[in-house]
Image: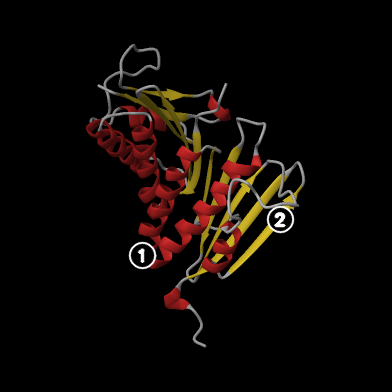
Amino acid sequence: MNSSRTLELELPARSENLTLVRQVLGGVAEAEGWTAALLMDIRLAVTEACSNVVAHAYPSAPNGLIRVSVIAYPHQITVSVRDSGIGIVPRMNACPRGLGLGLQLIVALTTEVRIQSVPDESTDVTMIFTSPQTAVPQ
Amino acid sequence: VKRRWVTLAVQAGPTADAVVARLAGAVAAQAGLPIDRVRSVSILVDTLVGELSTDRISARFTPGPGTIEVALGPLMVGEGQRILRVKVLPDRRSREDDTNDAIWVDTERDSMSTICLRIGRT
C-alpha cells in the first residue's frame, strides 16, 4: 500500500454511506482520467461488494466498518473492500434476502477478483480492473 | 453509541484535490445541510487541502445534526497558525465558540495536529 496513488477510506457499514464510496470513486475517476464506462463498472462492482458488507458482515455489531482502498496504476486499478465481520458463511439454503447474484456481477465486471475470508474475523474482496485503452489486444 | 465519522487517507496532489472536498460535501449533505452550506463546506475544505504541505493527507469527517466537522492533517510545526490566517476561513477560532462555523487547530487528536473546521446549517 505504498503506491503514491493509493487512497484508503474507512466508514461505518451502513447503507446510507454507500453513496460516499461512490462519490470518492467519482473523484478518483476525475483525477485519474477514467472513462465513464470504466467508472460505471468500478462503481457497480464496488457498490455490490460494499452492499454485501452492509447486509451480511455484521449481523450483531452495529459499529462495523467498511474499509475501501484504491490503488490506481496507469494501466490497472485495484479496489479492495474489507470488513472485520463474520466472514463468508457457506449457505445451505438460498439466502432469503437476495438472489445471490452479487458475486457473479462482480466477477463479470472485473478483470480479476480475489476473495479471502476468515470466519468470525474478516473478509477481503479485491477487485482488479483494466483500463480499456490500455488492454492488451487479443 | 454508533460511530458516525468517516476517515480518508490519500496522497496529496490531484487525487486529494478531487476527492477530499467532494467527500466533505457529500457528508455535509448527508448531515442535512442546505445546498449553499454544502457548497461552502466544499470550497473551504478545498482551500484547506491546498494549504496543507504534508505528502499524505488524513481526513476525518464527522456529521452531526445539521453540522459537519472536518479534521485535516497532519500539520507541520507552525502550519496551523499560518492556515488560520487565511482570509476566507471562518472568524471563530475555537471549538468551544458557540457558533455554527468555526475553525481551530487540534493538537491532541490521533497523536497528530489537525486543522478542524465546523460548518453548521446557518
In this figure, which residue is indicated by the disc labeled 1?
A36
- Depth check, front residue: B50 or B76: B50
The circle on residue A116 is 2
Amino acid carrying label 2: it is Gln
Task: Tell me which colouring the rendered structure shows.
Answer: secondary structure
Instruction: Please tell me which residue lies in front, B102 or B67.
Output: B67
Q: Give percent across and percent down for residue B119.
A: 32, 26
Q: Is any atom of residue B12 visible in this view?
A: no
Q: Position of residue A101 (x, y in %)?
A: 58, 59
Total label count? 2
Q: Residue furthest bottom?
A: A138
Q: At which x and y percent is residue A29?
A: 39, 59
Q: Chain of mark 2?
A: A
Which residue is drawn at the image coordinates 58% and 61% (left, top)?
A127
User: Could you say which disc has been placed on residue A129 in the image?
Assistant: none
Distance, label 2 to label 1, CA atoms, is 29 Å
Q: Residue at x 29, y 34 (%)?
A: B38
Residue B19 placed where, x, y %? 39, 48
